Amino acid sequence: MTAAARAFPCACLDFVALASVALALACESEEATCTAQPTFTLSAPAIAPTYAGSAIEVQVRRSGTACAYEGGGADVELVAVGGGSVAPASLTVPEAGAKVVWTLGPAPIRQTLSAKGAPDSQLALTAEVAAPVVPQPFADVHAFLLAEGITSTTEDLAIAADGTIALGVDGAVIEVRQSADGKISISKRKLSGDPLPRAHGLAYDRQGTLWTADPVGGALHAIAADGKVKTHLTVVEGAALDGPNDVAVDVADRVLLSDPCRGELYYYDPKAGKVTDIEPFDLLTEGGPNGFAFQGDTLYVVTENTTLLCPKAKKKPPVTANLASLFRLSAKDGVFGPRTLVEGGLGVFGDGMAFDALGNLYVIIDTIANVAIDESRVMVLRAGESKLVPFVAFKKSALLANVAFGRGPLGETTMYAALLAIPPFTAPELRGLVRVEVGVKGLPLLP
């Protein structure tokens, strides 16, 4: 029971907001129980401001004719969830009520406002974006690569526990750091051991080892903390890997590797040194598996049309076929479970993805027009839903490749994306990093 309820034996709260919903809350105290069912009356304006970032004026009332008040006001603390904020967050509510301003978070996800200690007294809505958000540049990676004589593009990123961003390029790993005072430094990691033709997909395990998919060398590599490269996998079931693309690790540091050109997803056990399971996809109807992310023991996988990307593939769908689809399946103890389609026909290419702490999934999807990139976007699968909605986009310009939430000094509510430069589809300088504020804490790619 809240302090307010003890001070005022039957004090209830009533919200009035710009929306259209009614909720009821019974009011209890140690001394008495209100028999009335006070309602939350929400009056909507002509155009309800449900867009991300909108400000909504909310009136907080203590309800009800059946609830007797003793004294002046009741203290309440308000809590906004979904990346938004409320001001003032703590106030004393007189019998006539009070007003606060609820500002929605920047992402198109579920937003709630409630009184602390009274979870039923909640306003809830699903925010939309009025127009896709354009991410902002972060760190001048392109200039650094030019100075190093590196002409290849960036593609994937992995963020270590200390906030270091690893970016893969041909023959090297680039590290980007931001200090607590905001200063940015970029360096090339010193490597030794086996050859690393290209660091493409990237993922850290719990030991600090950086795993990378290498489509040029057709291999899965591990980069130890001391920079030594070890090649783990080049052949599966007697056939060479064709285009390894993305990697992830499970709760036991087993490694998942996608090869969209072969249309297969592999479960690899580093300790045993072998692939323990293979999940095949139909390149003509489902596309090849590209990016993935864990939610517990459930793996979400997005596919892509492989015709432009895999010249050696025997199955080639029409180049404009919208095969990018989102699937989910269990992945536990080195074994894949049954696969379910979440949503298909999302675009031509699917790429990286990441979860936030509220269970929303952010997925890169690319569309094409006239055999050219039309839009590269981050779409959101809201927690508990089955349709993706737009959030971030580049229109006919840059190409988003992979996403990850910041850690440490980077900020855990900021999402970072690596860019993919593929002339003539994009300008060669459009490589490196961009970022966008989500407002909600993100999860690392480790499950």
Image (cartoon, rainbow, N blue to C red):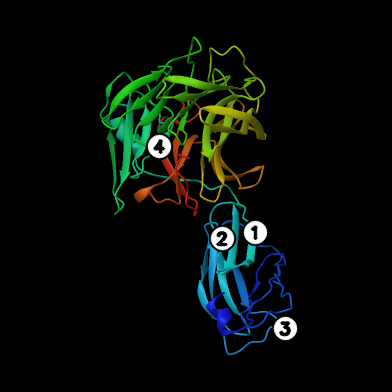
Instruction: Tell me whether the residue at label 2 lies in contact with that at label 4, contact meaning CB atoms closer than 8 angstroms.
Output: no
Give the mark, 1 or 3, whose residue is nearer the N terminus: 3
Q: Which residue is mark 1?
A: 125
Mark 3, secondary structure of its residue: loop
Instruction: Tell me whether the residue at label 1 lies in contact with that at label 2, contact meaning CB atoms closer than 8 angstroms.
Output: yes
Q: Quadrant of residue 123?
A: bottom right
Q: Amino acid at mark 2?
A: Leu
Mark 4, secondary structure of its residue: strand
* Left or right of 385 in this view: 309: left
Give the mark, 4 or 1, whose residue is nearer the N terminus: 1
Instruction: Tell me whether the residue at label 1 lies in contact with that at label 3, contact meaning CB atoms closer than 8 angstroms.
Output: no
Give the mark, 4 or 3, whose residue is nearer the N terminus: 3
Q: Which residue is mark 3?
A: 66
Q: Residues within 10 Å of mark 2 (few under 14, many from 20)?
A: many
Q: Amino acid at mark 1?
A: Leu
Q: Quadrant of residue 165?
A: top left
Q: Which residue is mark 2?
A: 104
Front residue of 155 and 9: 9
Q: For marks 4 and 1, give the CA distance.
A: 33 Å
Give the mark, 2 or 3, whose residue is nearer the N terminus: 3
How far across and how far down the image is residue 319, in percent?
62, 21
Q: Amino acid at mark 4?
A: Ala
Q: Which of labels 1 and 3 is toward the front?
A: 3
Q: Which residue is mark 4?
A: 158
Q: Which mark is residue 383?
A: none
Locate the N terminus and report the quarter of the image it occupies: bottom right
Q: Amino acid at mark 3?
A: Ala
Q: Residues within 10 Å of mark 4 (few under 14, many from 20)?
A: many
Q: For marks 2 and 4, give the CA distance.
A: 29 Å
Give the mark, 2 or 4, whose residue is nearer the N terminus: 2
Whether 72 is drawn above or below 294: the answer is: below
Please report the residue visible at 59 percent of the width from the left and 65 percent of the height from the top: 113
